[in-house]
Image (cartoon, rainbow, N blue to C red):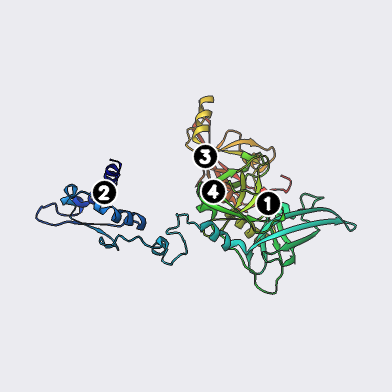
Amino acid sequence: MRRFFAKTRASAALLAVAAAAAGAGPALSDESPSRTSSTTISISTPLRWWMMQRMNLVPQELAFPSLGGLSLINHSVASATPPTDFNEEVSGSKGDDSRCCPWCLGRNSIAVAAEAAASAVVNISVTQSINGMMIAKGIGSGTIIDPDGTILTCAHIVLDFLNQRSITTGKVEVTLRDGRKFDGVVVNADFHSDIAVVKITSKTPLAAAKLGLSKRLRPGDWVVALGCPLSLQNTITAGIVSSVDRKSSDLGLLGVEREYLQTDCAINQGNSGGPLVNLDGEVIGINIMKVANADGLSFAVPIDSAAKIMEQFKKNGRVVRPWLGVKLLDLTEKNITHLKEKDGSFPDVRNGVLVVVVTPGSPADQAGFSPGDIIIEFNGKPVGSIKEIIDVMGDKVGTPFTVLVKRANNKLVSLHVTPAEMKPDR
C-alpha cells in the first residue's frame, strides 16, 4: 500500500509539471483537433533526472492526449542515467561549483569572494611614544585600493592618542597578507566620516581590491567581512546586509548625519578599516564598528560615501562640508500622520525634510528658516531626505541655494541660503 501511494504521489508530481507546461498551449497554438501542438519546456538537471526515473510510474490511462509532444530540452527520454556532475552542465566547467546566476549562492561563493579581495587586505599597527617610551598602540585593518600602495582604512585607527582630532605622529606599520612589512604614511584623514588614506611604498605593484557600488545593495544580500581582529590576520566572516541606510542618529552618534550599512558579520577590535565585500569580491563598505554587548550588529561606511571622501581629499586636500545651521528630520508616512494629529495646521505633504532646530546667527537663520518648515525642494530639485540635500550641496561653500519650504496651512515660501564651511568641532 505504501509503495502504491508513493508511486501515486510521484505520478501526480510528474503530471503537475506536465500540466503546467501544457497550460500555455491553447494561447500559443491553434486549438483545432486536426492539428498537432507541441510544447517545449526547460527543466533543471536534477529535476529532469528525477522525472526520467519516474516516467514509468505514470499510468498510461492517465496520459493527456492534449499535451501533444512534451519535449525535455537537451535530454533524451530514453536516457534515465543520472549525470555524474550537475555542476558541469550548470556552470560549463567541471567541478568549479560556480554560481549558475548572480543571485545564486554556491558552495564556494563566499570562499571565492573572499579570495578575490584577500590579497589586498592589510594589518595596520600604530604605536605612539614619548621620550622613547611607548604610551599607546592601536591595531586595525585596511584595503589596498591601488597597486601603488594606497590604502583605505578608518580614521580612528590613525588618530593621535593624545589629541583625538589630529593624525598620529607615531609609527604606522603595515603588514601584508604574505607577511611583508612596510612603514606607512597617513596621507589624509576625516574624523567625521571616519575615513583615512595611508600610503606605503613598494618596489613592485601590489595586489589591489576592486571597488563596487554600495547603492546596489539590498537588505538580505550576502556580504563577507575581511580583516585582522586582535591582529589575527586573514580572518574572514560572512553574513547578510541587515540595513542599507542605518542613520548615525539611530545609533546615538552626534555631529553630521551619516548613513551606515548594517550587517550581522562578526567583527571585533582590529577589524576596523577592513573591507566588506559582495559575492563578486568587490569592496562595498569599510567595516567601522560594532555594538558592544550585542551580537550581529556591525556597521560599515558605504563605499560610495568613502569614494566621495577620497575625491575631496584629492580635490581640496580635506573634506569641505557646507553648514546651514539647522537640525533636520526625514519625514515618513508614520511621523507625518503623528504630526498632523498633534497640529491640524501641519502642511499636507507626502514626504520632505522637517526643520526641527535653527541655530541663531547661522546661515539658515539669516535666510529666514523657522522650526516647523518642511523643505520640499532644494535648488529646484524635489527632496525627501537629508541625504538628498547633502548630495545637492556637495562641497559648495559660499554658493547660494534656493529652497522651497511649506509652512503651516500649506503656505509656500521661497528662501535663499548661502552655506558656510562647517568647522571641525561642529
* Residue type marked 4: Ile
Q: Which residue is mark 1?
A: 194
* Residue type marked 3: Gly
Q: Nearer the viewer, residue 271 or 44?
A: 44
| Quarter of image, res 386 | top right
Q: Position of residue 291 (x, y in %)?
A: 65, 42
Q: Nearer the viewer, residue 391 or 406?
A: 391
Front tag of 1 and 2: 2
Left/right placement of residue 418 relative to residue 215 reads right
Q: Secondary structure at mark 4?
A: strand
* Residue type marked 2: Ala
* Residue type marked 1: Asp
Residue at x 80% of width, y 57% of height: 127
Relative to 188, is 288 above or below?
Answer: above
Q: CA distance from mark 1 to mark 3?
A: 28 Å
Q: CA distance from mark 4 to mark 3?
A: 30 Å
Q: Which residue is mark 3?
A: 352
Q: Position of residue 319 (x, y in %)?
A: 67, 55
Q: Which residue is mark 4?
A: 240
- Marks 4/1 in contact by CB < 8 Å: the verdict is no
Q: Earlier in the sequence, mark 2 or mark 4?
A: 2
Q: Secondary structure at mark 1?
A: loop
Q: Which residue is mark 2?
A: 20
Q: CA distance from mark 2 to mark 3?
A: 47 Å
Q: Earlier in the sequence, mark 4 or mark 1?
A: 1
Is the residue marked by circle 2 packed among few (<14), some (14-19), or many (20+) residues within 10 Å?
few
Q: Nearer the viewer, residue 250 or 362?
A: 250
